Amino acid sequence: MKKAIVIGSGFGGLAAAIRLAVRGYDVTVVEALDAPGGRAYVHHIDGYTFDAGPTIITAPYLFEELWAICGKRLQDDVTLRALDPFYDVRFHDGTVFRYSSDHESMRAQVAAIEPRDVEGFERFLQASRDIYKVAFEGLAEQPFHEVGTLLRAAPDMLRLGGHRSVYREVSRYFRSDKLRILFSFHPLLIGGNPFTTTAYYCLIAHLERSFGVHYAEGGMGALVNGMVRLLESQGGRVRCQSRVEQILVSGDRASGVRLTSGEVIEADIVVSNADAAFTYGTLLSRHPRRRWTDRRLARASYSMSLFVWYFGTRRRYEDVYHHTMVLGPRYRALLDDIFKRKVLADDFSLYLHRPSATDLSLAPPGCDAFYVLAPVPHLGSGTDWREHAEPYRKAVERRLQETMLPGLDQALTVSHVLTPKDFEERLSSVKGAAFAMEPRLLQSAWFRPHNRSEELQGLYLVGAGTHPGAGLPGVLSSARILDQIVPAP
């Protein structure tokens, strides 16, 4: 059997490994951490279970397909539960919008904010549907390593406003500033600035309405473990605590990897689920590169990072929903601080995750498990997180106590933080960027690192840093693309 090495066991890496194993490759996944998952790692602390990264499943059929190609059923391994409403959005003035699949409820809430925007809401949904059919159904699942693909896609990209930003596109349909914020913040979930991210990402509204927002019982770790079992059922394996130091090259082909332990693992193909800039700038640093040179990588625009606080409480907050967006007093100015000025602001907008609202198994009886994240600048800001982590956490705690979680300071039982420095050191993310390269128009599709490497034969890329981009649908689609470009063993 021909051998395949997959670097990294995030969702993209595991999906790629499963697909390669089904096609007949002998697959080994090498993972630097002590457990699989990558950004979807799971923290177990004093009886609490915390998903480290992704928490929202919006295209469950992509997971169902992985089980199906193995002759199995997803529901026999993992239970997915649809959540409706999808999430609450809490504006700074206390207004709460319940974002859901209920069309009439959405219309009524839009009308309560700005009656004249109801008609624009309907037109926005149609625009989102049109973009989805072209950008997701048509382009996200095909490789973009040939310029001809870009040229064929360009007319549709221009017709559907791909040259506009998400915020600019949304503003065409809504007068209200609140509604412009409400329907434009989605790029932040994949590391993009709504004011610079291509309007193609307006497709998320239709994606959510079409397939819903789902939760995996037991947390995202249950889904990761299910994928590992699925890979093993096809003869593949995952090796943890196996950090890759170098991708080996023979002639003009990738020929395997060398681990930091010195062990060499030979392979016929190598698939990197690591950050694309790290793959080229570090794992291939000894190999001369034509396109993804150190200079080009240094000039690329990288996504924001995240400050994530995982905490448990000795009481339950029954009024807090599973997913809540807690918006701060500023929108564009805060995003300018994060993406342009790259300064750590005194205010913030937050995503509050309370999975124990749905799944009691994640916290001890009578307790709640939370994680809250704040978008922050990547390490290009020069922020010393050893100094700022605890003051920033305390500020987040005060904000939550004032808005959503009264008495939080007295209810805390466990606490753990993840900073941009952890993204760099633990997850090998260049500049500590949480979502690899920023999803701007000229860093998308053909302009993004290709799924088939431009530098070496036999090297392929999956995950957030390659086409089509970040988010679970994106990284699973990147693995799906391998079926078209990796030769049969």
Image: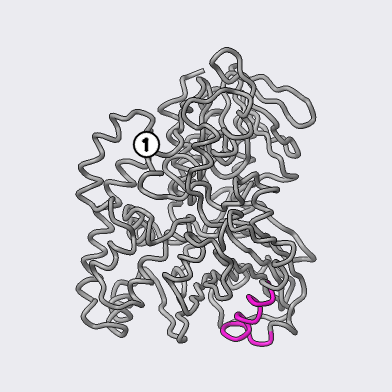
Report the magenta residues as a range. Answer: 393-407
Q: Quadrant of residue 36?
A: top right
Q: Is residue 242 left or right of residue 96?
A: right
In the image, residue 122 lies in the stretch drawn in magenta: no
Residue 70 appears anywhere in the view: yes
Q: Nearer the viewer, residue 488 or 388?
A: 388
The residue located at (46%, 65%) in the rendering is 336
Residue 240, percent across and down?
73, 39
In the image, residue 398 lies in the stretch drawn in magenta: yes
Q: Is residue 221 above or below residue 112?
A: above
The residue located at (65%, 77%) in the rendering is 395
Give the dominant element type of the magenta stretch: helix, strand or loop: helix
Q: Nearer the viewer, residue 408 or 51?
A: 408
**Amino acid found under the numbered disc labelled 1:** Trp
Residue 288, percent across and down?
56, 23
The residue located at (61%, 47%) in the rendering is 224
Residue linked to disc 1: 446
Q: Is residue 477 above or below residue 372?
A: above
Q: Is residue 114 above or below residue 461?
A: below
The residue located at (24%, 59%) in the rendering is 127
